[in-house]
């Protein structure tokens, strides 16, 4: 069987598929839905969960215009119809229409929010459709009058002569105030450095964190009752910026439990929800999942975590990879609105302190607004799902070199920052009885894959200038 062909329409996202139907003396055969081929021609991988058949015994049966909250893939097993679609979504295309006469060699993908209807042109017509959410009894879905004068569908059989249900004869007129809003975006960990940056690029997103207040709702992903009560079906995208990042405290008994709950169990829960509800999951990971022996880490490098924090992040990565629609964004050395290394060095410079900073850990800074910009790019460009490294660009630098860049921009001499090694720093921490987690010494990541999508990361020192200004 050859590939079907795809045709666009005046309604965004509504596409016509010409199927490869093979006829002989016995009848015909067609691949009505073949996921690999459909995705190859440009259909979304919409994940159907239910297949329905509507058998229409008589010519003139007219059904719709119904706007259920799911995507549909409609086709015919027998007969012919006149199909009509109306865009009921918020936006410039609200009220746009498209009509098409269909036989068994034609299918139409109908995106969520587009009203769907048809009129039967032959007796014994079997209309079939796949949907990606389960139909629920007792739930009222939006509909539109078949004879609405605004959309003025030119039905081939006059509606006065058609066979129409009582319900469809009493549907309302087109009303912009009832336009269907798109599914929403949810930011988890909205109070963190990355969560605050994401709010700029995803305005209007719902915001959750462990503590409520200032427009943020409390949600604990480790609480089964809270997770079950949350309306996950309302979201197209979930951005998980929440994480436990106290890498040293994670080496303690309490820290270990908290780290695994936040960094492994919670992402696994989200991956399961993404499978069940069809949303795109964006999860943020760390170069700590590697042991730091490679000079530059690529997306396909096997994970080799050193400490408890790193191990919990690696486990979360594996879980997220099971979500059908996911972006696993690995990053390093995040700098945003909050407590971080750059802010600490700037404060020390202002106070006249001359710190000793490790010089054998090498990587690149990632400013939170750059990480957010990369996230929006991946989603808006419909980049292939999978794992992407994201950091700012430029030469890889040690923590000591970055500290000196901060000091010189703060009016201090670079020489005011002295060097130490990770081993020497760890010995001092351990002598005081405090926990210390092993660190990867090489944290730089290859940016070739994200660049291949058309995203060019900003140089870290340019971003540093702006941040300190």
Image: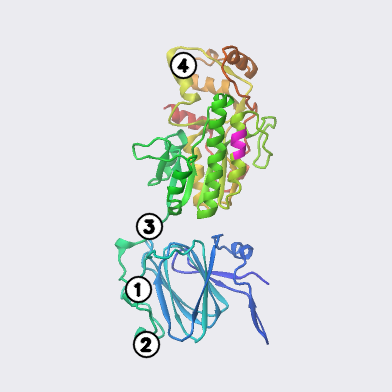
Which of the marked residues, 4 or 3, is nearer the chain's N terminus? 3
In three-dimensional space, the C-alpha distance between marks 1 and 2, rounded to whole angstroms, equals: 20 Å
The disc label shown at residue 151, or none:
1
Quarter of the rendering occupied by the N terminus: bottom right
Which of the marked residues, 2 or 4, is nearer the chain's N terminus? 2
In three-dimensional space, the C-alpha distance between marks 4 and 3, rounded to whole angstroms, equals: 49 Å
Name the mark nearer the viewer: 3 or 1: 3
Name the mark nearer the viewer: 2 or 4: 2
Residue 313 pos. (x, y %): 59, 36
Indicate left or right for 142 with 354 as reference: left
Query: Under tag 4, what secondary structure?
Result: helix
Which of the marked residues, 1 or 2, is nearer the chain's N terminus? 1
Name the mark nearer the viewer: 4 or 3: 3
Contact? badges 4 and 1 (CB < 8 Å): no
In three-dimensional space, the C-alpha distance between marks 3 and 1, rounded to whole angstroms, equals: 20 Å
Residue 100 pos. (x, y %): 47, 77
Q: Return the residue at label 3.
A: 181
Q: Return the residue at label 2.
A: 161
């Amino acid at each position: 069987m050859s590939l079907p062909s795809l045709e666009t329409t005046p309604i965004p996202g509504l596409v016509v598929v010409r199927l490869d139907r093979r006829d002989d003396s016995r009848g015909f055969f067609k691949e009505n839905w073949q996921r690999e081929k459909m995705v190859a021609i440009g259909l979304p991988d919409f994940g159907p969960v239910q297949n329905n058949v509507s058998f229409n015994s008589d010519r003139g049966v007219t059904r719709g215009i119904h706007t259920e909250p799911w995507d549909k893939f409609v086709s015919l097993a027998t007969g012919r119809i006149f199909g009509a679609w109306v865009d009921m979504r918020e936006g410039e295309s609200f009220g746009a229409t498209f009509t098409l006469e269909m036989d068994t060699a034609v299918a139409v993908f109908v995106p969520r929010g587009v009203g769907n209807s048809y009129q039967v042109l032959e007796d014994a017509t079997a209309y079939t459709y796949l949907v990606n959410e389960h139909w629920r009894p007792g739930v009222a879905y939006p509909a539109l009058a078949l004879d609405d004068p605004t959309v003025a569908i030119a039905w081939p059989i006059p509606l006065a002569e058609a066979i129409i249900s009582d319900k469809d004869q009493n549907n309302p007129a087109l009303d912009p105030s009832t336009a269907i809003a798109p599914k929403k975006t949810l930011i988890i960990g909205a109070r963190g450095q990355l969560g605050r940056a994401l709010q700029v690029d995803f305005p209007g997103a719902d915001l959750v964190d462990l503590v409520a207040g200032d427009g943020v709702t409390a949600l604990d992903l480790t609480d089964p009752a809270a997770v079950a009560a949350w309306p996950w079906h309302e979201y197209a995208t979930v951005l998980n910026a929440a994480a436990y990042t106290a890498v040293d405290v994670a080496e303690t008994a309490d820290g270990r439990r908290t780290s695994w709950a936040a960094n492994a169990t919670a992402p696994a829960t989200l991956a399961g929800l993404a499978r069940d509800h069809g949303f795109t999951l964006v999860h943020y990971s760390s170069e700590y999942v590697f042991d730091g022996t490679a000079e530059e880490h690529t997306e396909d490098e096997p994970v080799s975590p050193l400490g408890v924090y790193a191990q919990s992040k690696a486990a979360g990565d594996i879980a997220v990879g099971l979500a059908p629609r996911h972006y696993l964004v690995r990053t390093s050395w995040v700098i945003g609105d909050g407590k971080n290394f750059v802010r600490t060095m700037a404060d020390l410079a202002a106070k006249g302190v001359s710190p000793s900073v490790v010089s054998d850990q090498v990587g690149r800074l990632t400013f939170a607004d750059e990480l957010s910009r990369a996230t929006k790019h991946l989603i808006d460009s419909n980049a292939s799902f999978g794992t992407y490294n994201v950091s700012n660009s430029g030469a890889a630098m040690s923590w000591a070199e970055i500290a000196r860049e901060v000091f010189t921009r703060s009016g201090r001499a670079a020489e005011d920052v002295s060097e130490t090694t990770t081993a020497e720093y760890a010995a001092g921490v351990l002598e005081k009885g405090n926990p210390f987690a092993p660190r990867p010494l090489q944290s730089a990541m290859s940016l070739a894959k994200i660049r291949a999508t058309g995203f060019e990361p900003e140089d870290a020192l340019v971003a540093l200038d702006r941040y300190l200004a």
